[in-house]
Image (cartoon, grey):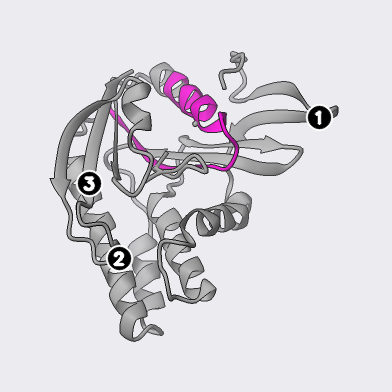
Amino acid sequence: MDQETTINRLTFPAHHSSGNNFEVSTCFFKQHLFKMEISKLNNSDLPQVYEMAFEAWKDAYPGQSDAFIRKVSKFIVRKNYYENDYRYKISEDGIIRAILLGCEKDDKNNALEWVELQTKDLHGSELLIMNNQKDYLVKSDDLLATYLTDIDIKLALFISNKRGYGTKLLNHFMKESQVKGKDKMYLWTDSSCNHHYYPKQGFEEILSFANANANMMEEDYRTLFYSKKI
C-alpha cells in the first residue's frame, strides 16, 4: 500500500556506504543543521511507525473514532512487517521520517492471529470495516504472491512524511535487494494512493482491476500491481 505524505506500500539520493547497511548525510534547512540517516527499522521503532500510519490514514475512515483508526492502522503495519533484512527507515535526529518494509515470497508473520483477537471487541461498522480491510489485504497479497519467484522481492509498505525521502529510501531498498541477488521488485497499491509515482520510478503496471472495497467511496476504486527489473 502508499503516499508521499505517501503511503504505498510506498519517496533523495545519497551516497551508499559499502560495508555498512546505512547511509548518512548532513542537511541544512533554515540554518538548522540536522543529520539524515538510513538504517534498519527495529521492533522498538514500531510505536513511531504506528503513529505515522495513523496520520497517513486518519481521513480514510470518516465517522470512526481515532482509537479505532489507530487499530486499523496498526493492523496494516503488522500485516506488512516481517522479521527480515528488508526493514528500513530514514531518521532525522532520532525522529523517523520515512519507512519501507519489504519481504520475500514465503515470509510469514502473526498479523492475522493478532487481528482475530482485536475483532472480538468490535461491533457494527467497526467490525465490518476491520473484516473488510483484512480480506482486502489478504486477497491482494495472495494474488501478488503468484507473480513472485524465490529471487524476487516485494515492496510491502511505504510511508514518508517528508518530500523526497520516499525516493531516497526506495533507491536504497533497490540497491540492497540487488546486492542480495534479487531479480525483480513487485508491489500492489490502489487508486486511493499516489499510484502515478511508480511509473515515474520505472515500474511497469502488470495488472489493474476494479475492487469493491467497502471502505472506499470512490466509484472507480482500482487495485494496481507493478513490477520493476532491479
Relative to 144, say whether 79 is above or below. Answer: below
Q: Nearer the viewer, mark 2 or mark 1?
A: 1
**142 horizontally vs 87: left or right:** left
Work out whether mark 3 precedes mark 2 in sequence or the reverse, and give the earlier one: 2
Q: Which residue is mark 2?
A: 215
Q: Callout 1: 10 Å neighbours few (<14), some, many (20+)?
A: few
Cα separation between marks 2 and 1: 41 Å
Q: Residue furthest front?
A: 219
Q: x, y percentage for residue 103?
A: 37, 39
* Quadrant in which the C terminus is drawn: top left
Q: Which residue is mark 3?
A: 223
Work out whether mark 2 precedes mark 1 in sequence or the reverse, and give the earlier one: 1
Examine the image and state in which quarter residue 30 appears: top right
Element type where label 1 sits in the image: loop
Q: x, y percentage for residue 129?
A: 32, 72
Relative to 51, say whether 174 is above or below. Answer: above
Could you tell me if the residues under marks 2 and 1 are in contact, i.e. CB atoms within 8 Å? no
Which one is in front, 209 or 183?
A: 209
Cα separation between marks 1 and 3: 40 Å
